[in-house]
Image (cartoon, helix red, strand yellow):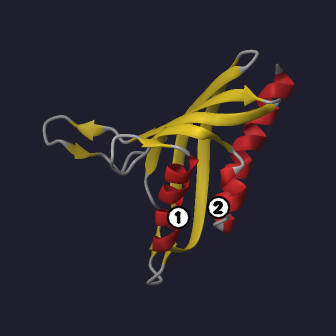
Amino acid sequence: MPTTQAELEQHINKIIEGLRAKDLGALEKLYAPDVVSFDIEPPLQHVGVSAKLKNWSNAFTFFQDLDYEVRELTFTVGDTVAFGHGFGRLSGTLRDGTATRGMWVRVTYCFEQIDGTWLITHDQVSVPFDMSTGKGLTDLTP
C-alpha cells in the first residue's frame, strides 16, 4: 500500500508540474478519457478529458505565470480504486502583471487503475459559502 500511496502522490505532483508548465499534453495523460469533473466553473459537471483540459486552458489564458499548491492530501487506497482529498490553490501572475495569491479550494480526486495505470476518473473542486449571503468564502486557509 505505501508504494501505491507514493504513486498517487507522484500523480498529483505531475498535475502540479503540468499546470506550472501550462502543458495540456502532460495533463491529458493523467485523466481517464471519460473523466467527470465537478470543477469550480460552470456548468455543474464537465464530462470527458477534453472538457477538463478546456477548463485548464481557460485558466492558462488568465495567467502569465502559474503555480498550484496542494496541502493536507490524504489517500484511501483499494486494489483498483482510490480517492484522495485535500486543499488546492491556484496562484501566480496575471497577464496584466498583477500578482495573485489565489484562493484555497477543497479538492477530491478519484482514481481508477486502468490497464495498470492510475488515472483520475473524477475530481471535484468546491468553495465553502456563507449560507446567509450565498457568497463564496474565498479567504479561508487550511
* Residue with the mark numbered 2: 24
- Contact between labelled residues 1 and 2, with CB atoms less than 8 Å apart: yes
Residue 46 x %, y %: 44, 44
The quarter holding residue 39 reads top left
Tell me which amino acid carries mark 1: Ser
Viewer-nearest residue: 103 or 122: 122
Residue 2, horizontal then vertical, whole percent: 83, 23
Q: Judging from the image, what secondary structure is the residue with disc 2 in?
A: helix
Residue bearing the label numbered 1: 57
Task: Tell me the tag on residue 78.
Answer: none
Dot 2 surroundings within 10 Å: few (below 14), some, or many (20 or more)?
some
Looking at the image, can residue 107 be seen? no
In the rendered image, the residue lying farthest to the left is 132
| Quarter of image, res 114 | top right
Foreground of the two, 64 or 130: 64
Q: Residue furthest right?
A: 3
Residue located farthest toward the top when viewing the structure as drawn: 79
- Residue 70 pos. (x, y %): 60, 45
**In the figure, is residue 53 to the left or right of 118?**
left
* Residue closest to the far bottom: 96
Residue 82 in view in this figure:
yes
Q: How many marks?
A: 2
Mark 1 secondary-structure assignment: helix
Q: Amino acid at mark 2?
A: Leu
Residue 81: x, y in percent? 68, 21
Q: Residue at x 60, y 52 (%)?
A: 69
**Sequence order check: which comes first, mark 2 or mark 1?**
2
Position of the N terminus, as image quadrant, is top right
The vertical placement of 75 against 62, above or below, is above
Q: CA gap, disc 2 to disc 1?
A: 7 Å
Identify which residue is drawn at 66% across, 52% down. 28
